[in-house]
Every structure is written in structure tokens, then in C-alpha cells.
Amino acid sequence: MGTGKRPLQAAGRVAGGMAAVENPRRKDGMEVFIEELKRKIIDTLELTDIRPEDIPTDGVLIGNELGLDSIDVLELVMMIEKDYGVKIENREVGVQVFGSVRSLARYVDEHCLRAGR
């Protein structure tokens, strides 16, 4: 017997005209996942004076007013791998993934789906 809940799908389209599909295991939606990532960024990097709403969702994540550097990125990469089982294999991918919190959330969501998480 089903729960009556359907997997969430993003309304927008991505490159190539394919619909972007959120991880059906993430029942609370992408915006809530973005807020979760913001809290994890704060906790991982011990940003005691920063609140989730202080971190721009679509703005530049690295090198902005938060002052994140390459060591911070390394810590975030390790947190993503530990908490979500998602690897960021190289610098080129990392540059794209850490472009914004939204791009990080999309990457993690997409790769969690592939990994069956």
C-alpha cells in the first residue's frame, strides 16, 4: 500500500531540455535541502557569527564576504563525502560545484540519486 506521496520534480528545465528531477528520497524539497547545507557549512567551518540567511543561495560561495578559502573547501568536500557519500573528484568539478550553495545542492542531490541514497 502506498503512502499517497509522489516524488518531487523541479518545475524548471536544465541544459538539453531535460526536466531536472530532485532526489525522491529528499521529500522536503530542494529549498529545505539548501537550508540544511547552509547549516552544515556553518557547523563544519565553525562560522560562529554567520546565520544560514547570511549565506547567499545563488551568490558566489568561495571568495565572497564569508572569506572561504581552499582549506575551507577541502573541509566542505570531506563533509559532503562523509554525510552524503558524494565525491568531488577534481578541482575542475569543485569549481563548478562550489559556485553557489544551489549548485552544491544540485550536485549532491544528483549524485545521491545515482548512488541510490
Image (cartoon, helix red, strand yellow):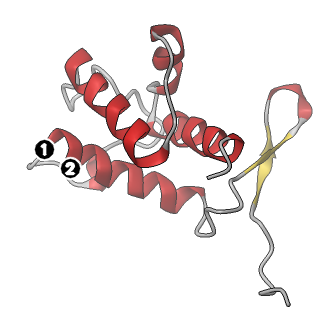
Q: Position of residue 4 (x, y in %)?
A: 81, 86
Residue 64 sits above or below residue 18 on the image = above
Q: Identify which residue is drawn at 9% across, 49% down.
A: 48
Q: Amino acid at mark 1?
A: Glu
CA neighbours of label 1 inside 10 A, class few (<14), some (14 to 19), many (20+): few
Q: Amino acid at mark 2?
A: Asp
Tell me residue 7's x, y (percent): 77, 66
**What is the secondary structure assignment of the residue under circle 1?**
loop
**Occupied quadrant, residue 14:** top right
**Tag 1 and tag 2, C-beta contact below 8 Å:** yes
Q: Residue at x 80, y 73 (%)?
A: 6
State the residue position of label 1.
46
Of residue 100 and residue 22, the one placed in the foreground of this image is 22
* Residue in view at x 88 percent, y 37 percent: 18
Where does residue 35 sit, x and y in percent of width and height? Answer: 41, 57
The residue lying toward the viewer, choosing from 90 and 54, is: 90
* Residue at x-position 55% and y-position 40%: 108
Question: Which dot marks residue 97?
Answer: none
Total number of numbered labels? 2
Say which quadrant the N terminus sits in. Answer: bottom right
Horizontal side, residue 21 vs residue 34: left or right = right
Q: Can you name the residue that lies furthest to the right here?
A: 17
Q: Residues within 10 Å of mark 2 (few under 14, many from 20)?
A: few
Q: Which mark is residue 43?
A: 2
Residue 9 in the image: x percent, y percent?
A: 78, 58
Badge 2 marks a residue whose secondary structure is: helix
- The answer for how far apart the CA atoms under marks 1 and 2 are is 5 Å
